[in-house]
Image (cartoon, rainbow, N blue to C red):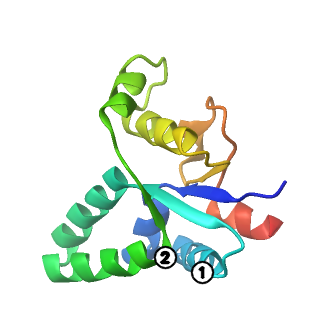
């Protein structure tokens, strides 16, 4: 299958930015592939806010801003809107935050979610792969 719009979950970015070995290598390769234009990498504004908070907490606000500026030059930002919360609240899925991410990805025609925590996405209608799995099928 050819994937055109790929939704990236927060753990993929955090693996790279917090140098979580060995996963950071796959995250870096994924972002490099995204720069080629072969497919579009997307994430939600909620994920970007969460990443800023965690990077600022682990390092500082200046580093967090710098890293987000780099990321936003590579990825397409998808809005986090009230209906995403409503759909997640009315859903039977257990992980609230991942459910919100699914609804954002689905609403914006993403055809794949990349996450290291794929078990939280198993009951959704979009396919889910780890960064490593996705890179293997390229």
N-term-proximal mark, 2 vs 1: 1
How far across and down, in percent of the image, does residue 17 sit? 38, 76
What is the C-alpha distance between the residues marked 2 and 1?
6 Å
- Side of 137 where 110 appears, left or right: left
- Side of 3 where 40 appears, left or right: left
Where residue 23 sits, quadrant-wise, is: bottom right
Look at the image and tell me in which quarter the N terminus lies: bottom right
- Side of 70 where 118 appears, left or right: right
How many other residues sit within 10 Å of disc 1, few (<14), some (14-19) or many (≥20)?
A: some
- Side of 83 where 64 appears, left or right: left
Residue at the right extreme, as displayed:
1
Residue drawn at (48%, 64%) of the image: 76
- Say which element carries label 2: helix
Residue 19 showing in the rendered view: no
- Say which element carries label 1: loop
Please tell me how many numbered marks the rendered image carries: 2
How far across and down, in percent of the image, does residue 125 sit? 66, 32
Q: Which residue is mark 2?
A: 74
How far across and down, in percent of the image, does residue 68 sit? 32, 74
Q: In the drawing, what numbered circle is on residue 115?
A: none
Q: Which residue is mark 1?
A: 35
How far across and down, in percent of the image, does residue 16 sit? 45, 75
Residue drawn at (81%, 58%) of the image: 2
């Amino acid at each position: 299958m050819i994937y055109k719009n790929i939704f990236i979950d927060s753990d993929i970015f955090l693996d790279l930015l917090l140098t979580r070995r060995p996963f950071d290598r796959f995250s870096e390769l994924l972002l490099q592939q995204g720069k080629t234009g072969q497919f579009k990498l997307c994430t939600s504004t909620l994920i970007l806010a969460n990443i800023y908070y965690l990077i600022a907490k682990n390092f500082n606000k200046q580093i967090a801003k710098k890293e987000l500026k780099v990321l936003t030059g590579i990825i397409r930002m998808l809005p986090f809107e009230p209906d995403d919360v409503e759909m997640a609240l009315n859903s039977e899925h257990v992980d609230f935050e991942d459910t919100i991410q699914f609804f954002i990805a689905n609403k914006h025609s993403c055809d794949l979610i990349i996450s290291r925590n794929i078990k939280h996405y198993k009951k959704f209608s979009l396919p889910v792969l780890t960064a490593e799995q996705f890179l293997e099928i390229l």
